[in-house]
C-alpha cells in the first residue's frame, strides 16, 4: 500500500489528533458512457495544491462533528463505522478547517469523504486505507476515480474506466505536472453545477458515447497529452487538454447545450480564448473553468488585466499550483 504522505511524528502511537490535508481536482471529461459490455466513465484530471480540503479529528469525550459540512462528515463517519464494523464511532470531534464551495467542479465530495475515512482510520489504528479501499468505505468513485487516485498520488491522473464487474476503475497512468506551470480557476460567485438527483437524471438523458469518440479521446491522451507532459511542452500539453475537454464535453451536448454547461459558460470559454488563455476547459459540470500559464508571472498578469465578461456575473479568479504529492497526514 502506498500511504498518503505523513508528517515525521506520524508513527507515534501516543498521537491522538489527526489532520488530513487533501488536494482538490480538475476533471477534464469522461472517456465513455453507455457501453453495455466495455469500460464506462474513465477520464483525465489534475490535482491542485489550492484550494484544499482539510479535516481534523481531535480527541474528545464523545464523537461529534462541527463546523461547515458537519452533516456530510457525520454521514461519511457512519459509513466508516459500518465498513469497519466498529461498535461505535471513536471519541473525537471531526471538523473541516478548510474547503472550497461544494458543487463547483473541484471534487469536494470525494476529497471530503476520503479525508474523513482516513482521519477516522488513523485516529483509531496504526495505519490508513489503500486508495481503492478508501473509496469503497465512503462509496465514492462510482463514475470518476480521478479524485480517488489523486488523493493518494497527486499529479495528473488517467483512469481508463471500469468494467461492469469492477467496483472502481483501475489506475491507468499517473504523471508529474510541471511545477512552474499555473492554472487559473474562473468561476462566477455563488454559482454551482449539477449534483445529486439532477446529475443522475442528466446521465439518463445523455446518449451513449460512440466507440469512435472514445478512441479519439484516448488518442489525444496517448499521442498528444502524455508526450507533451513528458517533454514539458506547454503548447502541446495545453492544446491536448483543450481538445480533449471540447470533444469530451460535446458528448454531453444534449444536457449542456454545447461542449460546456450552458450558454454563459460556452461564451465564457470563447471569451477566455480571445484573451489569449491556453488549455481552456470546464471541470466536471462546472461552473469552474480553467486555463493554463507557463509561469506564475504570466498567470498573475492575466488576472490583473482580465476585464469583466458580458454575463454581468462577478467572477472569482484564483491562481493554483499543480499538486504532485497527494494528501498529507499530520499528527499532534
Image: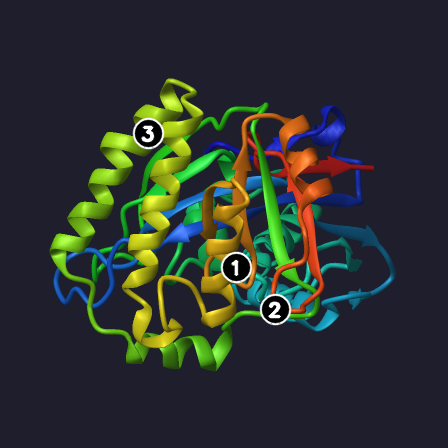
Q: Are marks 3 and 1 in contact (CB under 8 Å)?
A: no
Q: Which is nearer the N-term, disc 1 or disc 2?
A: 1
Residue situated in front as seen by the camera: 33 or 327: 33
Residue 20 location, x and y as percent?
A: 69, 44
Q: Nearer the viewer, residue 272 or 9?
A: 272
On the image, the x and y values in percent for residue 218 come to 22, 43
Say how the picture is coloured: rainbow
Label 3 to label 1: alpha-carbon separation: 27 Å
Identify the residue at horizontal 51%, vertical 62% (top origin).
286
Asked whether, in this view, residue 315 is left or right of residue 269, the answer is right
Q: Position of residue 118 (x, y in %)?
A: 61, 48
- Pointer 3 residue: 226
Q: From where the camera sits, is residue 88 visible? A: no
**Alpha carbon of mark 1 to alpha carbon of mark 2: how far?**
8 Å
Query: Could you say whether the residue bearing mark 1 is in a helix, strand or loop?
Result: helix
**Are circles 3 and 2 on residues that touch, CB within 8 Å?**
no
Q: CA distance from mark 3 to mark 2?
A: 35 Å
Residue at horizontal 22 percent and vertical 73 percent from the top: 207
First in sequence, mark 3 or 2: give its number: 3
- Above or below, comparing residue 225 to residue 253 in the picture: above
- Could you classify mark 2 by the number of other residues whose Cα lies within 10 Å: few (under 14), some (14-19), or many (20 or more)? few
Q: Position of residue 231 (x, y in %)?
A: 37, 18
Residue linked to disc 1: 268
Question: Disc 2 designates what residue?
Answer: 311
Q: Residues within 10 Å of mark 3 (few under 14, many from 20)?
A: many
CB within 8 Å, label 1 to label 2? yes
Amino acid at each position: 500500500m502506498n500511504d498518503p504522505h505523513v508528517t515525521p511524528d506520524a508513527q507515534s502511537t501516543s498521537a491522538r489528533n489527526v489532520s488530513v490535508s487533501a488536494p482538490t481536482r480538475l476533471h477534464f471529461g469522461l472517456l465513455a458512457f453507455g457501453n453495455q459490455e466495455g469500460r464506462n466513465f474513465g477520464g483525465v484530471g489534475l490535482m491542485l495544491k489550492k484550494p484544499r480540503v482539510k479535516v481534523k479529528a481531535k480527541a474528545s469525550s464523545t464523537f461529534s462533528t462541527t463546523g461547515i459540512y458537519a452533516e456530510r462528515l457525520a454521514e461519511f463517519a457512519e459509513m466508516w463505522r459500518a465498513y469497519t464494523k466498529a461498535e461505535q464511532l471513536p471519541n473525537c470531534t471531526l471538523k473541516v478547517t478548510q474547503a472550497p464551495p461544494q458543487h463547483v467542479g473541484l471534487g469536494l465530495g470525494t476529497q471530503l469523504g476520503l479525508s474523513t475515512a482516513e482521519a477516522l482510520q488513523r485516529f483509531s489504528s496504526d495505519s490508513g486505507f489503500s486508495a481503492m479501499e478508501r473509496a469503497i468505505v465512503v462509496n465514492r468513485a462510482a463514475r470518476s476515480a480521478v479524485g480517488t487516485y489523486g488523493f493518494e498520488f497527486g499529479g495528473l491522473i488517467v483512469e481508463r474506466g471500469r468494467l461492469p464487474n469492477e467496483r472502481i476503475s483501475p489506475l491507468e497512468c499517473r504523471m508529474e505536472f510541471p511545477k512552474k506551470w499555473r492554472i487559473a480557476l474562473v468561476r462566477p460567485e455563488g454559482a454551482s453545477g449539477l449534483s445529486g438527483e439532477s446529475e443522475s437524471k442528466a446521465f439518463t438523458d445523455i446518449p451513449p458515447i460512440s466507440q469512435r469518440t472514445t478512441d479519439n479521446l484516448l488518442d489525444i491522451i496517448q499521442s498528444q497529452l502524455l508526450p507533451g507532459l513528458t517533454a514539458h511542452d506547454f503548447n502541446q500539453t495545453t492544446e491536448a487538454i483543450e481538445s480533449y475537454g471540447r470533444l469530451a464535453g460535446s458528448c454531453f451536448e444534449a444536457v449542456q447545450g454545447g461542449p460546456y454547461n450552458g450558454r454563459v459558460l460556452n461564451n465564457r470559454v470563447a471569451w477566455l480564448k480571445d484573451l489569449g488563455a491556453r488549455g481552456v476547459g470546464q471541470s466536471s459540470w462546472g461552473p469552474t473553468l480553467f486555463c493554463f500559464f507557463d509561469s506564475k508571472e504570466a498567470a498573475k498578469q492575466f488576472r490583473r488585466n482580465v476585464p469583466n465578461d458580458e454575463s454581468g456575473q462577478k467572477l472569482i479568479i484564483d491562481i493554483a499550483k499543480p499538486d504532485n504529492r497527494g494528501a498529507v497526514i499530520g499528527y499532534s
